[in-house]
Image (cartoon, rainbow, N blue to C red):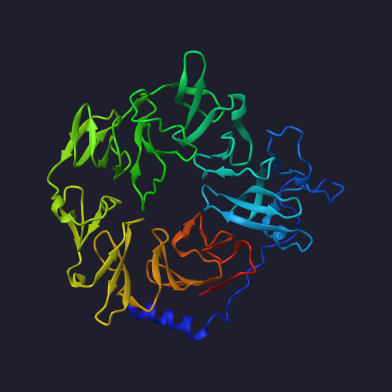
Amino acid sequence: MKERIFNNMKTIENTGYSRVISLILLIVTIAIIASGCVNENGGRNLLNELPDDPNTNVSGRTNENRGLELLNEKLDDPTTDISVVSTQHFSEGRAWITVYDRSTTITANVCINTDGYIVFWEAPYDSNHTLITSDFKDGLSYMINEDTGQFRIFDLNGNITFESPSWGENLIMLGYGDGKFLVAEYISDFNTNEWYVGAIDKTGKEIVPLKSYESQRRDVTNSGNLKGFYLGHGVFALSYSYNEYENNKIETLINIDTQKILLPKTYGVELLTGFEDGYALISGGITIDDEYYGSILKIGTDGSVLEEIEKIDYSFLAYAIKMPIFSEGLMFWRSAYYDIYGNVKIELPEYEDKLHYCSPFKNGYAVITLVGADGHKYFTIINQKGEEIFEPLKGIGAIIVLNEKYFAIRLDSESIAVFDMDSTHVMTIVNSKLIFNELTLSDDFIRISNENYVNIKDGSIIGKRNNINVELI
């Protein structure tokens, strides 16, 4: 297997990028950024047709008589001045991208499908405002005006199922899960001056009444940066910076079904898992019902402590800068992967004196970075049985697991080689704006940069194409 990868790498080295394929066969006719942007007489750009109401976004929808429109053709049209500003990964066959129209100085959020067609788009009335969009889940996505806090909920076809101004200016969106949109509203009147939290459905119907949570540690809802991450069983984690594989600190947990704050007096709590089988794992200095806990806890969806895990020996973490991240039931420290009870689950004795860094598990795999006797870095990947996918490789920049089927090797600052988990070389991608640490793969598309995507199956490109080359192997 090692020989196969080295042969593939040698092929890359020998051929350079002379066989790079320009995949533009799918791009056909159009010169518009969004549906409705040209009327039947042609020529007019909808971005110029601003509404009179300054609280109304500009928007475009699919014209059923004309069909969907290709994003790439608009970007390639020499008569337009459209550029891609940022991209989000695909979810449920849709992806949000942000484009800028220099002719109108308007930035629009465009929703595309996996064929590269624009499904719909939204743009703020005021070009100084920013629209934040969520991934699609259960066929729904929401968009927040970062400056005003107002939001819209969309289905996969761009139909607006709810728009927040009808609720009032103080309602903000925190997150979504299991059919519930977690919202907060600032109530200010003769008797009240505080935030209330509740939930609505996709139509804006209140399904969990808004109420005040006096037991929460502080007013965590009074911030546009706060987000709610759904953990299952009606529980949301509220956090300013939560990231499953990088930062697991949370502010608090709220069960929206029972309308209860689960951790009322927490500070710097680390979330180790979501809620599965009725419990989650947390770590950190925690006070629950006036009793302090300093170890790992199993907590129920009602906030009760189901188990305090004391068997773990924290002495082996004495020099840790921060608590290692549990991912997929395992965490790495020093020379092994441990479970929540401190039991060694995966050992790497053959590399004990060479280990440099072992990543959290993601999609069943972890990246192992080693330092060889020659002082150079080597990389490999292991599965949850501790089995190597290939022998350590030298002379590459880094490795990232894209999903359970593919991984990417960084060749240099502008190029990657993509392999499947059988170590078969799939493609090589060269992009001057490659963001290696942010590569994601979903719906068969690798999000390469803030400007483009590449299809893992056929190498087709969506987005800006004059700075990217793809070579299928």
Q: Is residue 1 visible?
A: no
Residue found 43% across the figure and 83% down from its top: 10
Above or below, 361 relative to 380? above
Q: Is residue 346 visible?
A: yes
Above or below, 9 relative to 315? below
For this view, does 366 lie left or right of residue 185?
left
Residue found 20% across the figure and 48% down from its top: 340
- Toward the viewer: 343 or 253? 253
Q: Position of residue 28 (x, y in %)?
A: 72, 61
Q: Position of residue 267 (x, y in %)?
A: 30, 38
For this view, does 458 lie left or right of residue 296?
right
Q: Position of residue 343 (x, y in %)?
A: 15, 53
Above or below, 63 relative to 217? below
Q: Position of residue 91 (x, y in %)?
A: 51, 48
Q: Residue furthest bottom?
A: 14
Total number of numbered discs in the rendering: 0
Residue found 67% across the figure and 53% down from its top: 100
- Toward the viewer: 404 or 298? 298
Q: Residue furthest right?
A: 41
Q: Quadrant of the N terminus?
A: bottom left
- Toward the viewer: 260 or 8? 260
Q: Residue furthest top?
A: 190
